[in-house]
Structures are given as C-alpha cells and as structure tokens.
Amino acid sequence: MRMRMAVALLGLICAANATAGAIDRVEPPFWWQGFRHTELQIMVHGDGIGASAASVEYPGVTLERTVRVASNNYLFLYLDIDASAKPGAFDLIFDDGRTRMTRAYELRARDPGSVHTRGFSAADAIYLVTPDRFANGDPSNDAVAGYGDAPSRTKEFGRHGGDLAGIRQHLDYIADMGFTMLWLNPVLENAMPEMSYHGYAITDFYKVDPRFGSNEQYRELSREAATKGLGLILDVVTNHIGSGHWWMQDLPSPDWLNFPNSHTVTTHARTANEDPYASEFDKRILVDGWFVDAMPDLNQKNPLLADYLIQNTIWWIEYAKLSGIRVDTMPYNDKDFMATWARRILDEYPDFNMTGEEWSGNPAIVSYWQRGKHNRDGYRSAMPSMLDFPLQIAVNGALTADEPDSGSVWTAAYEMLGNDFLYPDPGNLVIFGDNHDMSRIYTQLGEDFDLWRMAMAYYLTMRGIPTIYYGTEVLMANPGTTSHDVIRSEFPGGWPDSKSNAFTGKGLSSKQREAFGYLKRLLNWRKGKAVIHGGHLMQYTPVSDVYAYFRYDDRDIVMVVFNRGEEPASVDTSRFSERLAGHRFGEDVVSGKRYDVGSQIDLAPRSVLVLEVE
C-alpha cells in the first residue's frame, strides 16, 4: 500500500514539475503602466498550457478574457491595466485542475515624457547602416553556439561580424559628420541556416540577434546615441518571418500564415492595391503570397496576430526609446491592418514618425499610402511618411541622362517634383540617393565625382528628410555587379585588416577625402538651417543643362543651381526676381566664395552652387 502511495505521489510530483516547467515563452516579456490603450495581450506558450485556466490577482489589473487556439500549447491572455495599477510584479496563475503554477510578470513605469517622444523630421539627416558590414566591435560574438550561418568574410552573402558594439564605438564619427538619426537594417534574431546577415528574416520578435549583441546592448546604443544628438530608427518587418521562426515548429492556428501549405509566392504586382480594375484574385496573391519561399507570409487578418504585431512595435519604441520606424515591404502587408497598426502607435506616441517602403517610381502609387490622402477606393492610411522612390529614380536618372533633343536633361527631375501635389505632406517624405537594396549612388552615377557632388547637394537641400547610406561619404561603389553582397560591403576601417580607414582617414585616396569633407560640410551646415528643414520651395523650369530652385522663409533664402553641362554657363538671374529682388550677393556654403547674383551667375562646367543669398 505504502509502495503504491509512494509511486502515485512520485507521479504527481513529476507531473507537477513537468507542468511547472512547461511555459517556455511569455510575450511581451513585460509591459508598462500608463498607455492610452489599456488592453494588453500576453501570448503564453508551453506544453499543454491551453488546458489551463488562467487568473491574475493584482490591484488595477483585470483578466478580461482568455483565448484558446488550435494548438493546445498556446494561451492568449487579455488583461486590462487600469490607470490605478501601480508598477510592480504580479503572478500570472495557471491551473489545469491538477496543479497550480505561477509565472511572474512585471508592470513597469513609463519614463516621464515618453508619450511625447519626438520622431525624426525634416530637421534631421539619417545615416543608414547595415550592421553586419559596418564595424566589428566584439569579435567574440561572431559565432554563437546554436546558430548556423557561421561567419565568413569571403563567402558570398556570409556574415562578416559587424555588430552593435562596432556601431556604438563609432557614434562620434556619425554625429561629427552631421547626422542626427541612425537607421539600422533589422537587428532582431535571424536564426536561419544561411544569408542571415541582412536581418529581414526574423525568427524572434523580442530578441536582438546575439551575433549583433543583446537587447540591453541595443538599448544602451540608443541611450548613448541620444547623448550625442542621434536618434535611433528601427527597421520593422511585419509582413513576413523567417522560416526558422519558432512559430514554424508549432503554429498557434492554421490561419496564422497565408498559404501555409502551398508556400505560394507573391506576384509582386504592387499596383493591384490601387488598380480600379484589379481582380480580387490578384489582390490576394499580392498581399497573401510569400515574399520568397524562405519567408512565410503572416496573416494579419488574424486578430490575435494583429494585436501581437502592434504590441511588439510599441514594446520596442518604449523599451529602446526609439525616434522612428521604417516599415519594410509595406504594400505586401494587409493594408487595413497597416492602417490600424500605424494609428495604434500614433495613439500612444502622437509626435512620433514612421516611414514606409513602396518601391515604385510612380508618385500616385506612393502617395496612396501617406496619411491624409483621400483615395478613390476610400482607403485611409495612417502612415505619416513614405520613402520617396519616385524622386530618387527621377533625379539619379536626370544626372545620367543623355542630352535631350530639346528641353533639358533635368526635365524628369523637375516634373517629378511637380507631382508633389499628390502627397498630403511632401515635406515629410524620406529622400535618398540609394539604399541597401540598390546599387551605390556613386556607381549609379558612373563613378563620376562631379555628378556625385550634385546629387549630395540636391538631397541635402531638397524638401523632405535626407538619408545617406553608410560609406557614401567615402565613395563606396559596386562596379560591374548588382550583387547585394557587394553593395553591402565592409565599411573601410570597421575591421582590423581593413586596407583603409574612413574613421581616421588613413589610406583614403585624395578623392575620398574630398568627398568626405564635402558631405560633412553640407551636413553640418544643414543641421542648423531652419530654411532647409521647413522653408518653402520654388523651382524654375530647367533650360538645357541648368536647373535652379530656392528654399526660403521670412528670414533666409538659399539658391541651389546646377550646371550639368560640359561647358561653362552664364545664367540670367532676372527670371528669378521673385526670390532675388532686392538681393545682390550669395555665398557658396561649401567653398565660401561670394557670387554676384544681381544680374547673372557664371557656372563652371559640371558644378553645383548652394548659395546663401544676402
């Protein structure tokens, strides 16, 4: 009898221990008191946890409902956190009828002023970095036990070892250049067997990839960057995950993914979103199809998943004190979800800013997604900003176009800017000459230094928020190839064996040093120029190789004038009288040379002037 009782007791103890150790994930791992939306979803994952009844005993915190899904290994708790709830720890209680177990959960206090976190604006200039390729500050995390995709600096698309420590060690360099915002390609875990360095195949939404560093190191990067006048922008991927995501071993429900069995790939026909004649079939394949076979497409129409993704973004903003969000592959997301996602974030952070990627050269397509646009189909986006691909394509094209039969080489850029009437807020668009997915701007411009100077002057004086990809300041290029592996090459000086060092200037060519100085001068000048941040814009019809526009407000006038031609050009300034009347001189912000703008300006071949009009 005693033996049977002992065996039975041992069985109960083992069962209790098995249950007690069953919870392996609670997401989000903690939360804050004081959000406008008081509802909190907690996703609990563990062996058989779906069979448990959950409860919470903490003043001001109420368990409103429990949601069970197809997999018995999940339980979704919806808590209401009243304004009376005090920051502190409390238990999530689970009872399966045999055992009662608890999991501690923390409610934190929001930092004072968190609700008024200010996002990036036209007063900023953004430095875009691919972390794996910028600087290796901690070689000890190049390879991490349990993670595939071993580091290899010689293998195509291999990991090179760049990390958060490397970025943090060079924050002074970035700030001294004149940048005020730092956008990193995704840093969350990408536990993929290969090509994981880019960060766009996320496998854990609450964990920084350990080969970049830790969550705390990411937060410390943000804190230290802020002391140097740099905000941090998170690259968010809501459309898809990596096939190595832990969900793939145990989906909460069959509808957690789109096309979970067939892995149907998207058509990439993005105009189906706006096309009044598009079939519902085409619309569905565009949005629900997988971006690539290794990136399962998330079904954001599932309300549990939608809540999860919204909360995850809010969690990172609050945790890391972010200054902005960039949304990857925006038109591939469910657009109703994206509108809700953006509104929820802006409800909590009304002064925040976010920009979305819609890679189209058509401003009618891109403007569809900006907040305030009254679209024909009734869609109302809540995205404050978009990446201005149409302008990038037009300007870089104008800089390299063959001589026209009539008109001007600048016509495409001039007319594209004239399409700004399509945007609710063109001044809040993010402008750029290149990014991590396209050839370097120096290569796009045929490695022509004069054209590069024109491009930098344009993007740093035009309306909008300029973004410069790392290495542009030292003319990084990808001649003869469009391979992303080459485009995202190592930054010179980021590794001990680098042949040159952009951080110190050692080993740079004279042209690289000149480029560095030119960009640094423009950036630091722009930093203090309210007329560039928010002034009016007026452009004049380009004639032949010459194009001019003005930025102006009640105090200042800046004239930007280009001569793309091979010969000197004399420009009659009388047609600029709307802006120049009563003004005689202008000083070039780069050279310091003074020009008489009273009647005509003489332009050197293949040149640009940025003149502060006196």
Image (cartoon, rainbow, N blue to C red):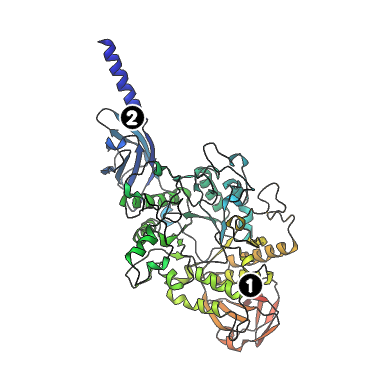
> Where residue 65 sits in the image (x, y, percent)?
25, 44
Q: In front of the other: label 2 or label 1?
A: 2
Placement of the N terminus among the 4 image quadrants: top left
Amino acid type for the residue under numbered disc 1: Met
Placement of the C terminus among the 4 image quadrants: bottom right
> Where residue 388 sits in the image (x, y, percent)?
50, 68
Q: Secondary structure at mark 1?
A: helix
Nearer the observer, 494 or 192: 192
Whether 458 is drawn above or below 259: the answer is below
Category of crowding for the residue at label 1, using alpha-carbon neighbours closer than 10 angstroms: few (below 14), some (14–19), many (at least 20) = many
Q: Identify the disc placed on residue 19.
A: 2
Q: Is residue 89 left or right of residue 594?
A: left
Nearer the observer, 347 or 396: 396
Amino acid type for the residue under numbered disc 2: Thr
Q: Identify the disc placed on residue 454.
A: 1
Regarding residue 338, the answer to whether it shows in the image is: no
Regarding residue 199, the answer to whether it shows in the image is: yes
Q: Residue at x 61, y 63 (%)?
A: 440
N-term-proximal mark, 2 vs 1: 2
Q: Is residue 180 left or right of residue 491?
A: left
Q: Residue at x 36, y 32 (%)?
A: 22
